[in-house]
Image (spheres, helix red, strand yellow):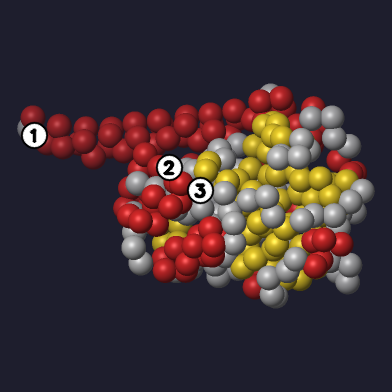
């Protein structure tokens, strides 16, 4: 009888406690971004120019100066748009000065409020050709898997707690938008940015990065500073093609990447990637 009782406690109580704890953690992660000022990270580049990271919960957007305004890298979930707007205002930036939005890949927490931003600002978008199907349907189609079992468990729980449906308002590029097929430097120069847009697949087939000539790599989910305690080791926590993940990071390093500004987590130096690549020699 006693054994049965303990068995019931283990079966019901422990999962309930785990779920409740996780729910609280997701709530904290989502709502730590209620103070606009706390969402903003102000950076200065080598020539003294300002650029920004806006953190909408678990996701980062970046604002980089370009001709006549700002180029933004990635959005957050669709529901993050309100607080994103408040943070941009708090940084002293007029949202209508966002002229370009580069979506690194068609995942819901990167493309989520792109359409709302387009409507409000008239910004033009820069998107990988391989993202087009998912952007047009407003649905992230996921083919990858977690880097390890711990992360698989935590992510599955996160998706349940957040009731994540991988959807976002569809994004249909127009004739003034830029579709990325080959690595590009010329277009960027035209909008006043010294850098290269380059394909960095592995996390997903459609993942691209913006590598500035001064070594700043805005790489979306090609690398992350997220769940390292669970063994992510600066890799994307979800991977479609592991070999491509490492090859893309080698490509970024070879092309001069010195500092990584990722979609998730705080920025870090290239030595973290070099150490990780030495560990996983693939
Ligand atoms: Zn992603």
Q: Is residue 29 above or below residue 109?
A: above
Quadrant where the N terminus is found in the figure: top left
Residue for point 23% across, 40% down? 11
Q: Residues within 10 Å of mark 1 (few under 14, many from 20)?
A: few
Q: Real-space Cα distance between discs 1 and 3?
A: 54 Å
Image-based side of 120 in relation to 77, left or right? right
**Disc ID at residue 180:** none
Q: Real-space Cα distance between discs 2 and 3?
A: 18 Å
Residue 104, image x, y percentages: 65, 59
Q: Earlier in the sequence, mark 1 or mark 3?
A: 1
Q: Residues within 10 Å of mark 3 (few under 14, many from 20)?
A: many
Residue 221, image x, y percentages: 55, 54
| Residue at image mark 1 | 3
Q: Earlier in the sequence, mark 2 or mark 3?
A: 2
Contact, mark 2 vs mark 3 (Cβ under 8 Å): no
| Residue at image mark 2 | 227
**Disc ID at residue 270:** 3
Camera-near label (2 vs 1) is 2
Residue 229 visible in this rendered orientation of the protein: yes
Residue 240 visible in this rendered orientation of the protein: no
Q: Provide the secondary structure element on which disc 1 rests.
A: helix
Q: Residues within 10 Å of mark 2 (few under 14, many from 20)?
A: some
Q: Provide the secondary structure element on which disc 2 rests.
A: loop
- 128 vs 183, nearest the viewer: 183
In the picture as drawn, the residue positioned furthest to the front comes out as: 47
Residue 151, image x, y percentages: 38, 49
Residue 271, image x, y percentages: 46, 46
Residue for point 43% across, 52% down? 274
- 257 vs 112, nearest the viewer: 257
């Amino acid at each position: 009888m006693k054994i049965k009782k303990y068995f019931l406690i283990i079966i019901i109580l422990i999962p309930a406690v785990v779920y409740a704890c996780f729910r609280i953690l997701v709530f904290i992660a989502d709502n730590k971004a209620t103070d606009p000022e706390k969402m903003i990270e102000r950076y200065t580049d080598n020539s003294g120019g300002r650029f920004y990271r806006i953190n909408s919960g678990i996701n980062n957007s970046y604002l980089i100066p370009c001709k006549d305004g700002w180029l933004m890298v990635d959005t957050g979930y669709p529901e993050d748009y309100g607080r994103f707007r408040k943070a941009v205002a708090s940084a002293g930036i007029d949202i209508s000065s966002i002229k370009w939005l580069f979506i690194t890949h068609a995942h819901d927490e990167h493309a989520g409020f792109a359409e709302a931003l387009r409507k409000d600002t008239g910004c033009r978008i820069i998107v990988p050709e391989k993202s087009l199907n998912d952007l047009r349907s407003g649905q992230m189609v996921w083919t990858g898997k977690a880097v390890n079992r711990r992360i698989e468990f935590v992510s599955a729980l996160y998706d349940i707690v957040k009731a994540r449906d991988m959807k976002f308002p569809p994004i249909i590029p127009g004739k003034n938008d830029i579709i990325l097929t080959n690595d590009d430097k010329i277009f960027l120069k035209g909008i006043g940015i010294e850098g290269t847009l380059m394909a960095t697949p592995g996390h997903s087939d459609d993942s691209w990065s913006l590598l500035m000539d001064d070594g700043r790599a805005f790489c979306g989910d090609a690398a992350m500073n997220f769940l390292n305690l669970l063994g992510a080791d600066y890799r994307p926590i979800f991977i479609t093609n592991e070999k491509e993940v490492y090859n893309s990071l080698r490509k970024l390093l070879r092309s001069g990447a010195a500092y990584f500004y990722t979609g998730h987590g705080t920025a870090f130096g290239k030595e973290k990637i070099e150490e990780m690549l030495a560990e996983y020699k693939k």
